[in-house]
Amino acid sequence: MESSNVFGNVHGHSIPNGFLGLKSTEIHVPTGQEVENSSRSSGGFGRSENEEKSCKKKYEKKIRKPRYAFQTRSQVDILDDGYRWRKYGQKAVKNNKFPRSYYRCTHQGCNVKKQVQRLSKDESIVVTTYEGVHTHPIEKPTDNFEHILNQMQIYAPL
DNA sequence: CGGGTTTGACCAGCGC
DNA sequence: GCGCTGGTCAAACCCG
């Protein structure tokens, strides 16, 4: 399966790589973080919570989470792609006057994350970065998905 | 009442 | 060694 394309096959919709000419930039994580379901006890509040996994994984496979950035032109940063997203944080970037929003997929076993950042240079441009792959079908009608493509304009340089 | 959103605080990694 | 940034989570609040 092509895990490189998140929207490769959505609800039976086969979308060619490029997303209607959308520029998909593949970003690899230099730090090689193995987040996901790994024991990130120290990552969060580990003072009151005792992790059950005391044994550390010495041979932790370096699973790099596929990250894909999509540049879209939209007035709102809330691009509903058909999945349910829950905002779990908001931080301001130095290069950007606008804060970055962190979204997470509210699904069991689906640890897909999404980040939305707006360019300070052009607030009309919204960069949506998808991290991970959905392992479940969309809970929204397919028509909506097409509607998304219709409502959002792809920022493609002529 | 439930789900989702908000803000603040905390931690780890990296740079200098 | 210290400081900074980025990233994440937790509790509280708000809305439907």
Image (cartoon, coloured by chain):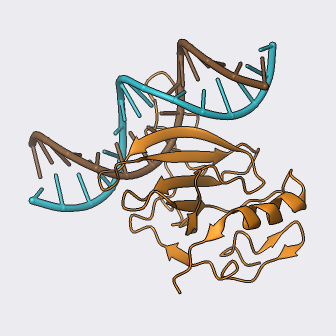
Chain colours: A orange, B cyan, C brown
Residue A42 vs residue A115: left or right?
left
Give percent across and percent down for residue A84: 74, 46
Asked if B5 appears above or below A102 in the picture, the reply is above
Asked if A66 appears above or below A21 in the picture, the reply is above
Residue furthest to the bottom in view is A158
Quadrant (top left/top right/bottom left/bottom right) for the N terminus of chain A:
bottom right
The image quarter in which residue B16 lies? bottom left
Residue A137 vs residue A49: left or right?
right
The image quarter in which residue A42 lies? top left
Which residue is at 47% across, 72% downward?
A: A28
Which residue is at 76% across, 51% downward?
A: A83
Q: From this viewpoint, is residue A54 visible? A: no
Give percent across and percent down for residue A27: 48, 72
Residue A74 vs residue A41: left or right?
right
**A48 vs A119, nearest the viewer:** A119
Give percent across and percent down for residue A135: 78, 59
Which residue is at 63% across, 49% downward?
A: A78
Asked if A129 appears above or below A16 in the picture, the reply is above
Q: From this viewpoint, is residue A143 visible? A: yes
Give percent across and percent down for residue A67: 55, 67
Numbered marks: total: 0
